[in-house]
Image (spheres, rainbow, N blue to C red):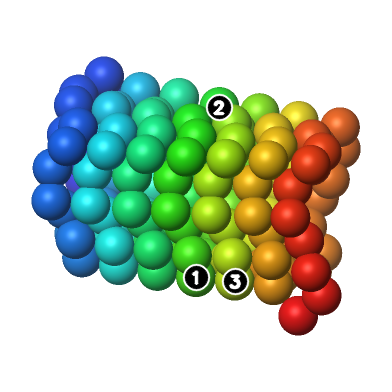
Amino acid sequence: MTRFIATNGSWSGRDLRGFDFSGMDLLGFDFSDSLLCDANFAEARLWTSNFTGSDLSYANFTGADCSSTIFNGAALQFASFHGAKLANAHVMLADLRYCNFNEADLTLAYLMESNIESATFHKAKFSSTGLANGEMTPP
């Protein structure tokens, strides 16, 4: 099976609801201000991609490599990052309510000022992860 590989493209401001990006290499892509509800990014490589201000509600990032990816101001309610790599990701001022971060690698990730109410982090890896001033309540 051939893997789709693309770098530094732009789908900014697009309606990509439900699109299947699973297994794709989308390095440095700009998805800012896009509608990506229910999109599937499972096992995708998204290094340094930009999702600033995008609606990613119910998106699936299971096993994805989101290293150094930017999710600032994104709506990510109910998204799954199960087993995903978010090392050095920027997730500031994002809505992460009910997200699944179980077994995710959050090493050096910045989740500053994000709402992580009822998000799950079972067996997640935290090392120098920034969580200051985020909103968190028990499930």
Q: Earlier in the sequence, mark 2 or mark 1?
A: 2
Q: Earlier in the sequence, mark 3 or mark 2?
A: 2
Q: Amino acid at mark 1?
A: Phe
In the image shown, does 47 or 2 lie closer to the viewer? 47
Q: Residue furthest right?
A: 127
**Where does label 3 land, which residue?**
98
User: Which percent across, then down, holds residue 93?
Assistant: 57, 40
Local packing at callout 3 (Cα closer than 10 Å; few below 14, some 14-19, many 20+) is some
Query: Looking at the image, do the residues carrying marks 1 and 3 touch, with CB atoms under 8 Å apart?
Result: yes
User: Which percent across, then down, holds residue 117?
Assistant: 69, 66
**What residue do we see at 19% from left, 61% from top?**
17
Whether residue 107 sits left or right of residue 62 in the image: it is right
In the image shown, does 60 or 130 lie closer to the viewer? 130
Q: Amino acid at mark 2?
A: Ser
Q: Residue furthest left?
A: 15
- The image's mark for residue 68 is 2
Local packing at callout 1 (Cα closer than 10 Å; few below 14, some 14-19, many 20+) is many
Which secondary structure, mark 1?
Answer: loop
Q: Nearer the viewer, mark 2 or mark 1?
A: 1
Whether residue 112 sits left or right of residue 86 in the image: it is right
User: Which percent across, then down, holds residue 2?
Assistant: 21, 45
Q: Please determine whether, in this image, residue 1 is positioned above or below residue 59.
A: above
User: Which percent across, then down, holds residue 88?
Assistant: 66, 28
Q: CA distance from mark 3 to mark 2?
A: 22 Å
Q: CA distance from mark 2 to mark 1?
A: 21 Å
Q: Quadrant of the C terminus?
A: bottom right
**Where does label 1 land, which residue?**
78
Residue 92, visible in the rendered structure:
yes
